[in-house]
Each structure stands twice: as C-alpha cells, then as structure tokens.
C-alpha cells in the first residue's frame, strides 16, 4: 500500500476479513499498531540501512526551520547523497529539533548533535541552505569548525536560486499584477462553497475548470490559477451580470 493513512487500518482489516474470512481468523490491525510498527520496527530498520549506505559517501544536509503547532521554531534535517551501491540519488530524514530561538549557534549545535548521533563524518559533508542571514552566519561558523577539523571549508555552490526567483516574481506582481493574485484568491474561496460551485456549473454552457488555490508562499502556482481564471472568464462575467441584475431587482 502507498500513501495510506494509519486511520484506514481498521477499515482495511474489515475488507480483508470479507475477502478471506477463513484465512485471516484472529488477524487485526489498528491505527496504534500501524504507528508502532513504523516507529519501532520498519523505520529504524530502514534508517540503519541508509546510515550504513551513506557512510563513506559524500552527503549533503538540507535543513529548514518552521513554526510548529506549539508556536515554537522547529527544524527538520534531511540527508541527500548519491549511493554507489544503489547507483541512485537517495534521501532520508536525519533528525528533528525544537529550536526555541533561531540563531546560527543553536542551529549548528542541533545539526552537529544529529551528525554525531548518526556517526556521519564531517569530512564528507556538503551543505544546502536558503538565503536568510542566519544561514549565512551558520555557514561561516560551520566553515570555521571544518577548517579546524578537516583542513578545508565547505565548497560554495551558491544559495538556493528559488528564493531569488520568488522575490523577483513578488516584486513584479506588486508593480504589474497584484490584482491577479488577489482575484485568484477571492474567486477560489468564493467557489470553495459546494453550493456556489454547483450553481456555477449549472449556469455554464460548457463544464468549467475547477479553480486553483493560490497562496503567496506557493507563488509558482499563480500561473495555473491565472490560466484557470482566463479559461472561465466569460462564465465569471456572466455570473457577475446575473448577480448584479438580481441585486437591482431586490432594490
């Protein structure tokens, strides 16, 4: 099974019992049982395989900080490397950390703790980061440590270009098209109500395209959202005229 929620475990048990009642007597599967299997059996098994495979390879750390549900800053660290044994690019989750404050010293400490626990050598480390100043400070501190321990610093391959592109797109939108992004959001949330979408579908001669959700932090989706707006523009104008006419009749 792929992309299955743990909450489906009990439903799947009933389906399997219905398919083969005689072969699955006494078989049970629950959400907690699935969670325990992943956390304490399958997860550690594959993590050990990845750690054995990555040792001896050059690897990159990808990390990002975000605010969790508890309003505290959290950081996820992922390892990316090319496996000589499997001849493919591999990813696996290294560790999570609650940061509290986000400073270069705290981030560096948490990263080094994760590397030490996983017994990953610093002499094969490269790093991937985005552009904030705290990460630039982190890189300087990491370089100082690496120069002391291995004699040379990180190879500079530049920062993430997606942030530069994103900032350029947002500045362009502010100057030439902020109304497009606002319109995309307003229209999406208006028709997110099932009854309004059904009414809109019935009023259209041809089946309209479903509106795309757009938020500023997913700016790359604006093109898709704008394309759907253009595809439905005639139907939207017709709906606006209809609603305006109804309002005038009421008044």
Image (cartoon, rainbow, N blue to C red):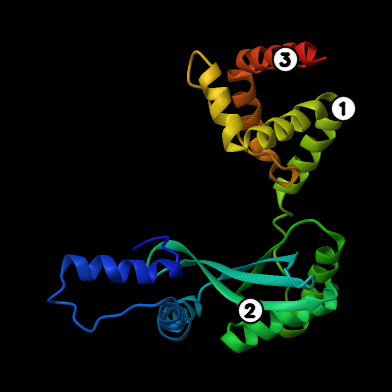
Tell us which disc is closer to us: 2 or 1. Answer: 1
The crowding category of the residue bearing disc 3, from other C-alpha atoms within 10 Å (few below 14, some 14 to 19, many at least 20), is few
Query: Which residue occupies the foreground of this view, 123 or 51?
Result: 51
Identify which residue is drawn at 58% across, 23% down.
200
Q: Residue furthest front?
A: 250
Query: Which residue occupies the foreground of this view, 246 or 169?
Result: 246
Q: Is residue 19 left or right of residue 95?
A: left
Image quadrant containing the N terminus: bottom left
Identify which residue is drawn at 74% across, 78% down.
98
Q: Is residue 22 left or right of residue 215?
A: left
Identify the residue under disc 1: 175
Image quadrant containing the C terminus: top right
Query: Which residue occupies the foreground of this view, 209 or 192?
Result: 192
Q: Position of residue 135 (x, y in %)?
A: 80, 65
Q: Position of residue 110 (x, y in %)?
A: 73, 81
For residue 18, above or below residue 242: below
Residue 185 falls in image quadrant: top right
Q: Is residue 85 visible?
A: no
In the image, which disc is placed on residue 123? Answer: 2
Q: Residue furthest left?
A: 22
Residue 85 falls in image quadrant: bottom left
Q: Secondary structure at mark 3?
A: helix
Identify the residue under disc 3: 246
Identify which residue is drawn at 62% across, 12% down.
234
């Amino acid at each position: 099974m792929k992309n299955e929620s743990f909450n489906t475990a009990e439903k799947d048990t009933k389906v399997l019992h219905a398919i083969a009642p005689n072969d699955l007597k006494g078989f049970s599967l629950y959400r907690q049982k699935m969670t325990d299997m992943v956390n304490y059996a399958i997860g550690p098994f594959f993590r050990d395989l990845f750690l054995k495979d990555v040792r001896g390879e050059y690897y990159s750390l990808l990390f990002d900080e975000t605010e969790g549900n508890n309003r505290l800053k959290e950081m996820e660290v992922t390892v990316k490397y090319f496996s000589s044994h499997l001849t493919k690019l591999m990813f696996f989750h290294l560790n999570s950390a609650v940061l509290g404050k986000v400073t270069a010293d705290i981030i560096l400490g948490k990263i080094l703790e994760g590397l030490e626990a996983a017994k990953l050598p610093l002499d094969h480390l490269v790093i991937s980061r985005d552009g904030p100043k705290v990460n630039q400070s982190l890189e300087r501190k990491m370089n100082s440590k690496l120069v002391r321990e291995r004699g040379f610093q990180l190879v500079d391959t530049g920062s993430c270009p997606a942030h530069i592109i994103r900032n350029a797109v947002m500045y362009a939108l502010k100057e030439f098209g902020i109304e497009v992004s606002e319109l995309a959001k307003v229209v999406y949330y208006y028709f997110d109500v099932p009854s309004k979408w059904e009414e809109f579908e019935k009023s259209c001669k041809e089946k309209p395209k479903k509106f795309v959700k757009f938020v500023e932090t997913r700016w790359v989706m604006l093109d898709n959202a704008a394309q759907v707006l253009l595809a439905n523009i005639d139907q939207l104008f017709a709906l606006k005229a209809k609603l305006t006419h109804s309002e005038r009749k009421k008044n």
